[in-house]
Amino acid sequence: MEQKRVNLDVSFVTSAPTIEQAPPPNISEVVFLGRSNVGKSSLINSIANRKNLAKSSSTPGKTKLINFFDAKFKVKENKFEFRFVDLPGFGYAKVSKAEKQHWEEKLTEFLYERASIRVFLRLVDARHVGLAIDNEVENFLKSIKKGDQKIFTIFTKFDKLKSNEKQKLKNKYPDGFFTSSEKKIGTDKIKEEIIKHIFGEIL
């Protein structure tokens, strides 16, 4: 199947240091979740076709901000828009247990109650599949998913695998998305599937 090229105009909106400061849920949202260093910022930049739109912290897990980006595109004369939500990477936060628990409770509340979320992008490092923390996130998302919300599993850094490893991963996860931000692999398919789920067959 030929992939359709969709040109998105993606712009940074705001960073919310608390859930309460998030923008109003007035537009369909796509949430990026994954461990620190899994490549969330790189994937956002690759999808947006911009180098430094999303920036990662120099200290993994230190920044506890939710970043919001508006995405717009046109099909013929019709304009469409939705929003990317980049959640803090989990697994490396160097904070107290009490602070970490409080933040995780707030994130759980956000993901469960945010009615505007239409798609969860669960990022997994293709070189380290099956980690307990990734499995916990998968089970959590399945437990809170409501209505027509969709979970996409995105395997990042796919180019780092050997040919036989790539095939094994594809065979094991036939519904997965296999990407490399460095090699510009897989992002067109992700964009197409996000748009199809939110807006229907408009491309």
Image (cartoon, rainbow, N blue to C red):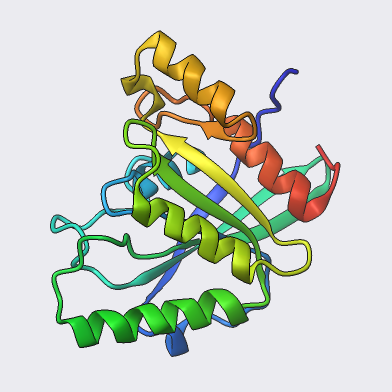
Residue nearest the viewer, comparing 11 with 143: 143
Residue at (42%, 10%) from the top-left corner?
164
Against 38, residue 20 (above or below) is below
Against 201, residue 186 (above or below) is above
Residue at (60%, 31%) from the top-left corner?
188
Q: On the rendered structure, is 120 left or right of 118?
A: left
Where does the image place residue 116, in percent across and percent down from the top left? 67, 72
Residue at (41%, 28%) from the top-left corner?
180
Where does the image place residue 200, in percent across and percent down from the top left? 84, 48
Against 14, residue 168 (above or below) is above
**Residue 61 figure quarter:** bottom left
Q: On the rendered structure, is 38 left or right of 146?
A: left
Residue at (52%, 65%) from the top-left corner?
140
- Which quadrant: the C terminus? top right
Where does the image place residue 77, in percent across and percent down from the top left? 83, 46
- Which quadrant: the N terminus? top right
Residue extending farthest top:
163
**Residue 35 figure quarter:** bottom left
